[in-house]
Structures are given as structure tokens and as C-alpha cells.
Amino acid sequence: MSEVDRGAPLIVIEGIDGSGKGTQSALLNQRLNAAGITSTLLSFPRYQSTFFGARIGEFLNGQFGALNELHPFLVSLLYAGDRYESRDLLLASRQSSQAVVLDRYVPSNIAHQSAKVQGAERAQLQTWIEQVEYGLFHLPKPDLVILLDVPVDSSQELIRRKEKRTYTDRATDLQESDTSYMGAVREAYLSLAEQSPEWRVVPVTEEGQVRPVETIADDIWQLVQPVLRLKEK
Ligand SMILES: Nc1ncnc2c1ncn2[C@@H]1O[C@H](COP(=O)(O)OP(=O)(O)OP(=O)(O)O)[C@@H](O)[C@H]1O
Ligand SMILES: Cc1cn([C@H]2C[C@H](O)[C@@H](COP(=O)(O)O)O2)c(=O)[nH]c1=O
């Protein structure tokens, strides 16, 4: 299939919880549209829109038990199910827009779930998640993954600024409040970025300070230009 037949490029914004993904995805989507490049923004998990999304909210709220009681492969299937239910929307968005911006996608599953295990088990889990999502569920692969890299202590500060979630009354969900787990997720993300040619890393802090939202947005804008495959809509 040619580049154009596949439709619009999938631009994925990734990073640990509180790294600014929601903020930067929304800004990128707005900036693309303002530049006359039609863009669709989707955020995963789709808590309010899919059967699996609702179950993920319950899982993150502790309704299925302590988060470490469930094997990460089984947990990954909830998130994969949410994307499987969203596949038609995703493919349609690629045809109706000139860019699709995703606030989290398959790499979130790989980084967050594989960070719960070590060594050979981690490598196997990464392979299984790719096999389920890209292989069995035929989800499209990203054209560009932008990793917003932030130290855990800075991310915790940003998480405290977040608005109330739809699925929990807590200020943080159960995973966000586990800082050693979040550190392992950050390492997993950085290792994925080193292995994969379509990944780019954007630092969220400079000399220990969180960079301004607009400066980070400008870096992202520069990275997005090469992947836009513009055609008449
Ligand atoms: N560069 C920044 N400077 C100051 N505040 C920021 C910056 N980026 C994000 N924020 C604020 O930090 C909070 C977390 O940002 P955001 O919701 O975008 O993160 P996230 O990665 O999407 O979080 P989560 O993964 O938990 O959903 C928000 O209140 C947002 O306004
Ligand atoms: C999409 C996706 C997410 N996760 C994890 C990452 C976070 O801990 C939560 C989602 O929280 P948010 O505040 O709504 O961003 O779920 C995952 O493990 N796998 C995934 O595919």
C-alpha cells in the first residue's frame, strides 16, 4: 500500500504520567488545524467511549484488586481491547484528516506493562503486546512517536496540577502515585526510543526546571513537519 493510501500519518505523543501529553497533543492538534492541515485528536484510554475503556477506569481505580495482583499481560489486553474497539474510528480518521494525533497509543501499553517485569520476561511481553495489537488486531503502526521525557519528581509536581479524573475521586490514580514504578516506566520508554527509528525524545525539563509549554510545543512542531504527507482533502 502506498504512503497516501494508508491515509494521514499517525503522530503519537508518549511519556510517563504527568509528562504533559494531554497538553501537547491538544496544542499540536490546534496548531495543525490553524495551519490549514486538518487534524484529528484521539486520546487513549477512551474511558467514556468503549466497553474496555470503562473497565480500564475501574481497574485504575482498584476495583479489580491491587494493581500488582494481575499479570501485566492480562492488563495489557484491556488496553488492547480499547484500541480494537476504536480501530474503525482510527482508520476513518486517517482518511478524513491530513494528520492524526494520538495522546497515548500502543507504546503506552508496551512501556507501562513491561516495566512491571524484568529481563527476558520484559522482552517477551513487549513482543506479545506488539503481536496482539499490530498483528492480531491489525492496528496501524505509528509514523512518529514523540516521547516527552521528564524526571519522576517533576512529573509528580505536574500531576498535582491536573484536574479531577472522570474515573476516580483521587488526586492521582493508583499507578501515578507509585514513583518507583513510574521510574521504571521512564526507563522502559527511553529504551524503546533508542531501539526504534520512528521515535524522537523531547525533554520536558532543562536544568531541573519544567520548560514552558510553548517551547516544548515548538520542538514538537519541528519534529512533525517531515512526516506530514499532504494531499488535497
Ligand atoms: N510545560 C509545562 N509547564 C507547566 N505546566 C504544565 C506543562 N505541561 C503540562 N502542564 C500542566 O501539568 C498538568 C499535567 O499535564 P497533562 O495533563 O498534559 O499531562 P499528561 O501527561 O497528559 O498526564 P496523564 O498521563 O496523567 O494523563 C496539567 O495541569 C497541565 O496543565
Ligand atoms: C493507553 C494505555 C495506558 N496505560 C496506562 C498509563 C496510565 O498509567 C494509565 C492511563 O492514565 P491516563 O491518566 O488516562 O493517561 O494507563 C497502559 O498501561 N497501556 C495503555 O495502552
Image (spheres, rainbow, N blue to C red):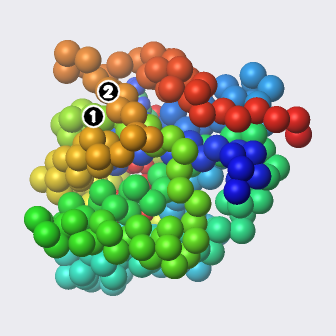
Query: What crowding class fits label 1: few (fewer than 14 Cα within 10 Å), some (14-19), or many (20 or more)?
Result: many
Mark 1 and mark 2 lie on one chain; the one further toward the N terminus is: 1
Q: Amino acid at mark 2?
A: Pro
Q: Quadrant of residue 49?
A: bottom right
Q: Quadrant of the N terminus?
A: bottom right
Is the CB atom of the residue marked by disc 2 within 8 angstroms of ligand 1's nearest atom?
no
Q: Is residue 168 left or right of residue 16?
A: right
Asked if the residues shown at circle 1 and circle 2 are in contact, with their CB atoms under 8 angstroms apart, the answer is: yes
Answer above or below: position of 186 versus 56.
above
Counting every numbered tag in the picture gives 2
Answer above or below: position of 59 versus 13.
below
Badge 2 marks a residue whose secondary structure is strand
Q: Is residue 95 visible?
A: yes
Q: Position of residue 192 (x, y in %)?
A: 29, 49
Answer above or below: position of 219 versus 29.
above
Q: Amino acid at mark 1?
A: Val
Query: Which numbered circle lies on residue 150?
Result: 1
Look at mark 2 in the image and give the residue it sits on: 203
The residue lying at 38 percent from left, 71 percent from top is 129
The residue lying at 71 percent from left, 68 percent from top is 88
The residue lying at 24 percent from left, 72 percent from top is 124
Query: What crowding class fits label 2: few (fewer than 14 Cα within 10 Å), some (14-19), or many (20 or more)?
Result: some
Measured Cα–Cα span from mark 1 to mark 2: 6 Å
Residue nearest the observer in this picture, 93 or 140: 140
